[in-house]
Image (cartoon, helix red, strand yellow):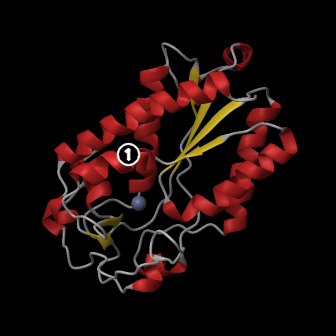
Amino acid sequence: MSILFADKSWPELKEAIEKNTLIILPVGQTEEHGMHLPVKTDAIIAEEVTKRVAEKIKKEIPVLVMPTIWQGYSMKKVAEWPGTIRLKPETFMEMVFDILSSLIEMGFKKIILISAHGNHTGMLRIVVRKIADEYKIFTALTYPSVMAKEEFAKISKAGPGGSTHGGEYETSLMLYLRPELVNMKKVTSEDKLVYRSQFYPNKVFWSTWGIQKTKTGIYGDPTVATKETGKKIMEAILKNYTEFIKEFYYRGDN
Ligand SMILES: [Zn+2]
């Protein structure tokens, strides 16, 4: 049976609402990811993670996966390379708010966002707050990269500055998920983020794009990325999401 929201008829969705089905909304973006990764990298990661997480928990928790958001906000700087689709922050926030409010108004109460694009963080937090104010429904905003952060830090070869944008983390995941879309002949370590500060990145928010120039549109070192690392990242993501989703579904207020 399909776990995709968009495959269902309205009577099937009515039944899903009655079962208090969990909705997961994958949020990606379309933007350049250097010379070796497709521009849809963030959307692919969000979608693949969401589908795998949903498949893993569906026996225990009723779940449906929304169509992936592939368009959103990227800094203008990233549009220096072809492939970046830029919505205004306001447009993106209104779009996500309207998608969530549509789901809530039709009766869904448990909603998780799985976001794979760093630029969206602040905007999505505001949307989640606005939804809570408006509907008293507390949605959860999550990031695969944060879910797997500790496990990835233990196996990362690139180290600090090696996995910001198009680096070891994303390239490894893509080698595992969609190897046919990765061109390892084009990888380079020349745009590894080498800037070091006692403040960045833990104490201040300061965009990588304003810290150090990039020649190829990435910040990181994809040369050390491997399919094996991608597999381990995905295992960590699945393990941590499974635990969190149980907590969210059974213990949250709504
Ligand atoms: Zn990305």
Quadrant including the C terminus: top right
Secondary element type, mark 1: loop
Residue 186 falls in image quadrant: bottom left
Res. 108 in view: yes
Residue beneath the point at 50% across and 61% down: 118
Which one is in front, 178 or 50? 50
Judge left or right: residue 187 versus residue 5.
left
86 relative to 27, above or below: below
Give coordinates of residue 106: x percent, y percent.
Answer: 79, 28
Which residue is outermost to the right? Answer: 134
- Tell me where residue 67 appears, x and y as whole percent: 56, 39
Find residue 249 and report its image quarter: top right
The number of callouts visible is 1
Cβ of mark 1 under 8 A from ligand 1: no
Q: Is residue 165 visible?
A: no
Would residue 157 appear left or right of 117 to someone viewing this image? left
Q: Is residue 120 above or below residue 77?
A: above
* 149 shown above or below 186: above
- Residue located at (33% from left, 59% from top): 38
x and y percentages locating residue 231 in the rendered image: 24, 40
Residue depicted at 58% across the width and 61% down the height: 120
Q: Nearer the viewer, residue 97 or 209?
A: 209
Residue named by callout 1: 148
Ligand 1 sits in which quadrant?
Answer: bottom left
